[in-house]
C-alpha cells in the first residue's frame, strides 16, 4: 500500500463513538479522510474536532441516512465523482438493539431497520464504490475493506429474514452482523485476485458507545481499545495480503457455522441483490 499520507480512507459512522476515534487517530497519522454521518451538524462538528486535535485539513464530510438505500446510492455517487480512488473503506456505521426490546422498526424502504442499516447499506455502498477500491489496489498495490462486525451473531431465518414474527432487538442486531460476516467471506473470494482485501472484526466487547449505554448500561471497554484493532486491519503492515478473515480484536476466530454454509450464503446474496436493486444493473 502507498504511504499513509497518500491514502484516502472512507469511514462510515465517523461522527461519534468508535468511528470518530478511528478518524482522529488516522488523521493524526496524516491520512486523507472521507467522513460519513447522518447528521450534518454533527458531521461538521466532528470535522472541526479532528482539525483542532490533529491539524489535518484533508477531510470531507459525507451526509447520508443509511436507512435509505437511495441516500446510500447518492453518497456513493458523490464519492465516485469527487475521488480518483479509495485505499481503505471502513464499514463501521450501525445500530444496536434499540431502546425498546420488542419494538420492530422499518427502514425508509420497508426493511427491518437493523438489517437495513447494518448490512444492506454497507453492502450497497461497497458495491457501488468498488471501482475506486480496485483502482486504489491497482495503483497502490493493495486496497482494504474492513467490516466492523460483532461477536453477537444470530443465524438468519430465511423464512422470516425481516423478523416479522417474534421480533427482539438484540436478535435483529445479531442477525445483521452474521449477514455482514457471510458477505465478508463472499466478497473476499470474489476479489481474491484483485488486490482488494476484505476482512471483518469484533473490535471490543461493550465499548463506551451510545448503543452500548442504551442497551447494557455500563460499558466494559473503551472506544480507544476497539479503535486499535480497526486501525490494525485498515493500515497494519502485518495484515498485507490477508483476506477473508474474521478477528476477535487481533485473534483470527471462527464465526457461527452458518457463515460458512455456501447454500445459506448464496441465498443471502441472491436476496440482497434483489433488495438492493442490483439484478437489473448486472
Image (cartoon, helix red, strand yellow):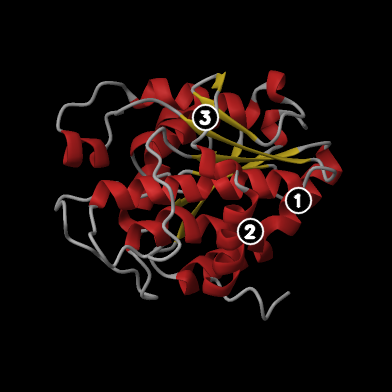
Dots 1, 3 in contact, CB < 8 A: no
- SS for callout 2: helix
Q: Residues within 10 Å of mark 2 (few under 14, many from 20)?
A: some
Q: Position of residue 31 (x, y in %)?
A: 61, 34
Q: Which mark is residue 268?
A: none
Whether residue 94 sits left or right of residue 2 in the image: it is left
Whether residue 152 sits left or right of residue 197 in the image: it is left
Dots 3, 2 in contact, CB < 8 A: no
Whether residue 86 sits left or right of residue 217 in the image: it is right
Residue 34 shows in the view: no
- SS for callout 3: helix
Observer-side mark, 1 or 3, equals 1
Q: Earlier in the sequence, mark 1 or mark 2?
A: 1
The answer to whether 70 is drawn above or below residue 188 in the figure is below
Identified at 57% across, 47% down, the residue is 182
Residue 111, quarter of picture:
bottom left
Q: Position of residue 188 (x, y in %)?
A: 70, 44
Q: Which mark is residue 190?
A: 1
* CA distance separating discs 1 and 3: 22 Å
Q: Earlier in the sequence, mark 1 or mark 3?
A: 1
Most distant residue in the bottom direction: 280
Q: Which mark is residue 230?
A: 3
Residue 4 shows in the view: yes
Which residue carries the number 2 mark? 266
Amino acid at each position: 500500500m502507498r504511504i499513509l499520507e497518500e491514502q484516502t480512507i472512507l469511514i462510515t459512522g465517523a461522527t461519534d463513538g468508535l468511528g470518530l476515534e478511528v478518524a482522529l487517530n488516522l488523521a493524526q497519522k496524516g491520512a486523507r479522510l472521507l467522513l460519513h454521518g447522518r447528521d450534518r451538524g454533527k458531521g461538521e462538528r466532528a470535522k472541526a474536532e479532528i482539525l483542532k486535535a490533529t491539524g489535518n485539513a484533508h477531510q470531507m464530510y459525507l451526509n447520508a441516512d443509511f436507512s435509505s438505500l437511495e441516500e446510500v446510492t447518492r453518497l456513493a455517487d458523490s464519492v465516485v465523482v469527487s475521488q480518483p480512488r479509495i485505499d481503505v473503506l471502513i464499514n463501521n456505521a450501525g445500530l444496536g438493539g434499540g431502546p425498546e426490546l420488542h419494538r420492530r422498526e422499518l427502514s425508509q424502504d420497508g426493511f427491518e431497520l437493523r438489517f437495513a442499516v447494518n448490512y444492506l447499506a454497507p453492502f450497497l455502498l461497497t458495491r457501488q464504490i468498488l471501482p475506486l477500491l480496485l483502482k486504489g489496489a491497482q495503483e497502490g498495490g493493495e486496497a482494504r475493506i474492513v467490516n466492523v462486525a460483532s461477536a453477537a451473531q444470530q443465524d438468519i431465518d430465511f423464512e422470516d429474514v425481516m423478523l416479522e414474527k417474534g421480533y427482539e432487538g438484540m436478535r435483529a442486531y445479531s442477525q445483521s452482523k452474521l449477514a455482514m460476516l457471510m458477505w465478508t467471506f463472499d466478497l473476499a473470494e470474489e476479489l481474491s485476485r484483485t488486490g482488494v482485501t476484505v476482512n471483518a472484526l469484533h473490535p471490543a466487547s461493550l465499548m463506551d458507545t451510545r448503543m452500548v449505554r442504551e442497551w447494557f448500561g455500563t460499558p466494559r471497554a473503551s472506544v480507544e481499545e476497539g479503535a486499535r484493532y480497526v486501525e490494525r486491519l485498515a493500515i497494519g503492515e502485518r495484515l498485507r495480503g490477508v483476506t477473508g478473515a474474521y478477528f476477535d480484536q487481533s485473534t483470527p476466530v471462527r464465526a457461527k457455522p452458518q457463515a460458512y454454509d455456501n447454500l445459506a450464503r448464496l441465498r443471502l446474496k441472491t436476496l440482497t441483490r434483489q433488495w438492493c436493486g442490483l439484478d437489473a444493473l448486472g
